[in-house]
Image (spheres, helix red, strand yellow):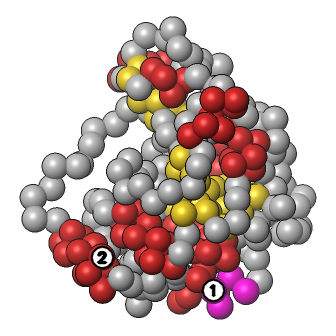
Amino acid sequence: MRITVAIITYNWPAALERVLEALARQTRLPDEVIVTDDGSRADTREVIERVAATFPVRLVHLWQPDDGARMSRARNRAIAAATGDYVILIDGDMVAEPHFVADHEAFAMKGCYVQGSRVLSDENLTRRMLADGSVRATFFTPGIERRRHTLRLPWLARRYAKPGRKTRGIKSCNWGFWRDDLIAINGFNEAMTGWGREDTELVHRAYHHGLYRREMRFSGLATHLYHRTRKNIVDNPNDRILDDTRQRKLVRCELGLDQHLAEFAVAPPDVRPGSAGNV
């Protein structure tokens, strides 16, 4: 089982550096990490190149021009480029606990996707974590919300893992999908731009396809670095796309992953020095 971790990022290189450092310290290293970049400035590439010098696994940087928030397109490009059988999707502000990848591997089950959780850090803790990569959120760390998500209890995690089709708490910041399933539903809907709903819309198509959800609590831990939210959007056009998907019980979106498969028929190069682009 080859595992690809796909990180979406946009103009926060300090956070991305911490995310990459955490992935380099995993007890079970991913087989590949893809940073998919929604149009960041050159300083993001500089961070990736610096981290690449000592990064332990294949590292890919995909960049697309900054033409507004195109998260769906950026994630689709990473999925299309992935060489792994299983794709873990995280955001560029999610700092993983050392067992993160191992826990995702343990929860992976055919016919299911995995929904992980996150610890929310406040501004002060985020500032400390960005300044010092050794700082991690634990149960007793001040400045966190959803404190229970700092607890790694595999025996308890298994009690929550029964497959179901829950629609609450959908968050693409910590997901695990079989790549074949994402191809079958045509990935994210690129008609959805701007903030929100693209993850919920994808999950509804996944359910229409016959997939189930495995809840990953007390495992697959990660700390979400603080930033301002854009949740309160009035009359979000993405809501109308989501409603249409629900009503028509769509499985595939029209504008999705398949338009990027030819571009990545040959895997993109490994950016690590001396890698010669090997997969």
The residue sitting at the left extreme is 234
Q: Amino acid at mark 2?
A: Arg
Element type at mark 2: helix
Element type at mark 1: loop
Q: Is residue 184 left or right of residue 99?
A: left
Task: Identify the residue under disc 2.
Answer: 246
- Residue, x 55% and y 69% (percent of image)? 211
Instruction: Tell me which corner region of the image, top left, top right, bottom left or bottom right, holds residue 244.
Output: bottom left
| Magenta-tinted stretch | 260-265
Q: Say the numbered circle drawn on residue 261.
A: 1
Instruction: Tell me which corner region of the image, top left, top right, bottom left or bottom right, holds residue 233.
Output: bottom left
- Other residues around mark 1 within 10 Å, as few (<14) / some (14–19) / many (≥20): some
- Quarter containing the N terminus: bottom right
User: x, y (%) of residue 92?
Assistant: 51, 47
Instruction: Name the front one of labels 2 and 1.
Output: 2
| Viewer can see residue 156 | yes
Give the spatial CA distance, label 2 vs label 1.
26 Å
Residue 237 is one of the magenta-drawn residues? no
User: x, y (%) of residue 128?
Assistant: 49, 18
User: x, y (%) of residue 195?
Assistant: 28, 59
Marks 2/1 in contact by CB < 8 Å: the verdict is no
N-terminal of the two: label 2 or label 1? 2
Q: Say the numbered circle drawn on residue 97.
A: none
Q: Amino acid at mark 1?
A: Leu
